[in-house]
């Protein structure tokens, strides 16, 4: 498989409004998409930064992935997302190589994307997300 361009950097935050104010007012980015993704337990804001996005994610519950991350490590970079043309094909290739993935099958991500996560234990401590663009609009 081959990773494509950097799609987004996911940043775990406790206070979405405060983080939004920082990125919009101090850093000059613009929110292009907002979504609550119940299946992933997050409320997210996407801000365009050139060809990629900053994704601010706040947890919907303490026992969600981002809630647990915040409790253990505090705010900070949570994951890195890379574009791939076909998430299902990428997962099949990785699994054939016995690479540890989190998602055995693709899931629905923000803005109608198709996504899958690779385990940080296999990725030098970085949670990696594969992102296939959908028909939805992310701005
Ligand atoms: C946990 N760990 C991480 C990590 N989260 N390491 C790097 N980056 C992260 N984000 C480490 C912990 O520090 C711990 O290391 C070990 O993994 C186990 O952590 P845990 O707290 O016991 O948590 P688990 O094992 O229950 O779950 C970790 C795992 C989970 C990564 C498998 O968070 C997961 O499935 N994540 C994928 C889904 C996700 O993150 N969704 C939210 C974003 P030690 O060394 O202490 O053992 S959703 C999203 O972004 C969507 C909407 C989108 O972009 O479209």
Image: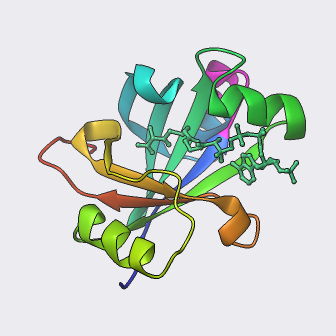
Left or right: where 72 falls relative to 127? right
Picture residue at 43% right of the left edge, 71% below the top: 95
For the rendered model, the colour scheme is rainbow
- Taking the view exactly as shown, the residue that stands out farthest to the top is 61
Tell me where residue 134 appears, x and y as whole percent: 17, 50
Residue 65 location in percent, x, y?
A: 64, 33
Task: Identify the main secondary structure in magenta.
Answer: helix
Task: Point out the stretch of residues depicted in magenta.
Answer: 12-21
Number of on-image labels: 0
Q: Residue at x 27, y 45 (%)?
A: 139
The relative height of residue 103 versus residue 59 in the rendered view (above or below) is below
Quick one: 125 or 110, which is closer to the camera?
125
Magenta stretch: includes residue 125:
no
Q: Pick whichever, 93 or 29, lies toward us.
A: 93
Instruction: Determine whether, in the image, residue 111 is placed left or right of residue 117.
Output: left
| Between 29 and 133, the one nearer to me in the picture | 133
Q: Is residue 4 visible?
A: no
In the figure, 68 relative to 60: above or below?
below
Q: Quadrant of ligand 1?
A: top right
């Amino acid at each position: 498989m081959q990773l494509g361009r950097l799609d987004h950097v996911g940043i775990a935050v406790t206070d979405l409004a405060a983080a939004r104010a920082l990125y919009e007012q101090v850093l000059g980015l613009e929110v292009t998409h907002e979504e609550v993704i119940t299946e992933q337990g997050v409320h997210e804001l996407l801000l365009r930064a050139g060809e990629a996005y900053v994704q601010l994610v706040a947890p919907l519950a303490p026992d969600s992935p981002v809630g647990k991350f915040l409790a253990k490590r505090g705010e900070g970079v949570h994951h890195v997302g890379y574009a791939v043309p076909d998430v299902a094909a990428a997962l099949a290739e990785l699994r054939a190589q016995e690479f540890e993935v989190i998602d055995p099958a693709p899931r629905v991500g923000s803005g109608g994307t198709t996504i899958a996560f690779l385990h940080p234990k296999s990725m030098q401590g970085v949670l990696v997300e594969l992102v296939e663009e959908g028909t939805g609009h992310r701005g």
